[in-house]
């Protein structure tokens, strides 16, 4: 187990190093030294600021010296400086991370529960009414754009209820958990539902397919022949073995959402990392874009390492040495 984790950590570090190399080539090598300083400074920056950036980033030195300076800063938690807003990129990222994490913390368990339970129910009786109902429901939400579902939830669960004197949910905005846990929860219910319903559709189809394969295995038939209850056979034996591809998908989705909840954050006015990335692209604020790319890549790598480590606990057939 320890050897496996060491290998996975080493592979994760290699992937992150490759990400830094690609980011450096795209943003530092490609445009050329003068263009890099101008792009990082912003469209309306004075020449003095451009010269300051060129000096700080060692743009007059060889590329390997520049990369070493860039990598050294990342290793020490320095994502760069946002000259457009005159503050460190880490401060900007730190403002958006709690909002994005709040979305993930609520939506991820919800979509996992809804998707797995509906997929299990579909697989227990294939081609039955229940199976067709959950499959159709999954197809509907899978085909529904996130912004459409978000707007519909705002229309019916916020606007219509509010005009009838029932103010259950705010329309937009974010309240920090430390400020008011109740308002934090109320403000995130609709975004959680939006993310969960759209994403759960994938897990319904994935769970159904995986469960159908596992339910035909010999050890499942043996468990039934021993007189075990159907509930125990399904949830104790079959589901545990079927969770491996679901765990993989879950790790990818959670890691991707760290920088990818763009549409949901835009619809509900939540200034998370996705919202920040969109505004940085609109303003051509390259230091913030670079910082968010690095953070989002690290999140995907970490989530995949955690998922791989959990395989041995979920599926007894997996042996890690």
Image: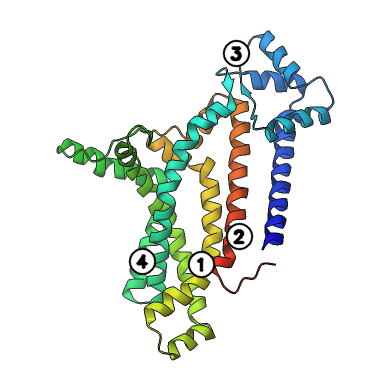
3D distance between C-alphas at marks 1 and 2:
14 Å
Residue corresponding to mark 1 = 243
Residue 194, relative to residue 85: is it above or below? below
Ranked by sequence position, the earlier of labels 2 and 3 is 3
Q: Position of 89 compared to 99: left or right?
A: right
Q: Position of 306 compared to 170: left or right?
A: right
Q: Nearer the viewer, mark 2 or mark 3?
A: 2
Residue shown at the point (45%, 70%) measured from the top left = 208
Residue corresponding to mark 2 = 309
Residue shown at the point (66%, 12%) measured from the top left = 49
- Dot label at residue 134: 4
Ranked by sequence position, the earlier of labels 1 and 2 is 1
Residues packed near mark 1 inside 10 Å, few (<14), some (14 to 19) or many (20 plus): some
Which image quarter: residue 176? Answer: top left
3D distance between C-alphas at marks 3 and 1:
53 Å
Give the secondary structure at mark 2. helix
Residues packed near mark 3 inside 10 Å, few (<14), some (14 to 19) or many (20 plus): few
- Measured as percent of width and height from the top left, residue 232 is found at 40, 78
- Dividing the image into 4 quarters, which one contains the C terminus? bottom right
Give the secondary structure at mark 1. helix
3D distance between C-alphas at marks 4 and 2:
31 Å
Ranked by sequence position, the earlier of labels 4 and 2 is 4
- Dot label at residue 44: 3
User: Which residue is most to the left?
Assistant: 164
Pointers 2 and 3 in contact (CB under 8 A)? no
In the image, 135 versus 17, the foreground residue is: 17
Q: Nearer the viewer, mark 3 or mark 1?
A: 1
Residue 142, relative to residue 69: is it above or below? below
Which image quarter: residue 62? Answer: top right
In the image, 232 versus 31, the foreground residue is: 232
User: Which residue is most to the right?
Assistant: 62
């Amino acid at each position: 187990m320890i050897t496996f984790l060491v290998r996975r950590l080493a592979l994760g570090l290699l992937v992150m190093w490759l990400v830094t190399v690609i980011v450096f080539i795209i943003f530092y090598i490609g445009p050329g030294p003068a263009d890099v300083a101008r792009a990082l400074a912003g469209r309306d920056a004075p020449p003095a600021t451009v010269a300051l950036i060129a000096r700080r980033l060692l743009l007059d030195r060889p590329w390997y010296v520049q990369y070493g300076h860039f990598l050294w800063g990342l290793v020490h938690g320095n994502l760069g400086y946002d000259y457009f807003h005159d503050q460190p990129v880490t401060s900007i990222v730190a403002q958006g991370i709690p909002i994005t994490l709040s979305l993930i913390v609520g939506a991820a368990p919800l979509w996992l529960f809804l998707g797995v339970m509906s997929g299990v129910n579909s697989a227990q009786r294939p081609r039955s009414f229940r199976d067709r109902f959950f499959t159709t429901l999954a197809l509907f939400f899978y085909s529904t754009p996130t912004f459409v579902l978000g707007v519909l939830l705002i229309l019916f669960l916020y606007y219509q209820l509010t005009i009838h004197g029932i103010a259950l949910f705010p329309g937009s905005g974010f309240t920090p958990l430390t400020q008011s846990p109740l308002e934090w929860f109320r403000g995130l219910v609709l975004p959680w539902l939006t993310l969960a319903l759209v994403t759960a559709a994938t897990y319904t189809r994935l769970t159904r397919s995986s469960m159908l394969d596992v339910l035909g295995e010999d050890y499942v038939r043996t468990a039934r022949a021993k007189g075990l209850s159907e509930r125990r056979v399904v949830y104790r034996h079959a589901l545990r073995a079927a969770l491996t591809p679901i765990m993989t998908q879950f790790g990818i989705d959670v890691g991707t959402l760290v920088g990818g909840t763009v549409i949901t954050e835009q619809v509900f006015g939540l200034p998370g990392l996705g919202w920040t990335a969109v505004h940085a692209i609109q303003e051509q604020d390259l230091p913030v874009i670079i910082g968010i790319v690095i953070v989002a890549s690290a999140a995907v790598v970490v989530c995949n390492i955690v998922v791989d480590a959990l395989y041995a606990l979920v599926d007894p057939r997996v042996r890690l040495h």
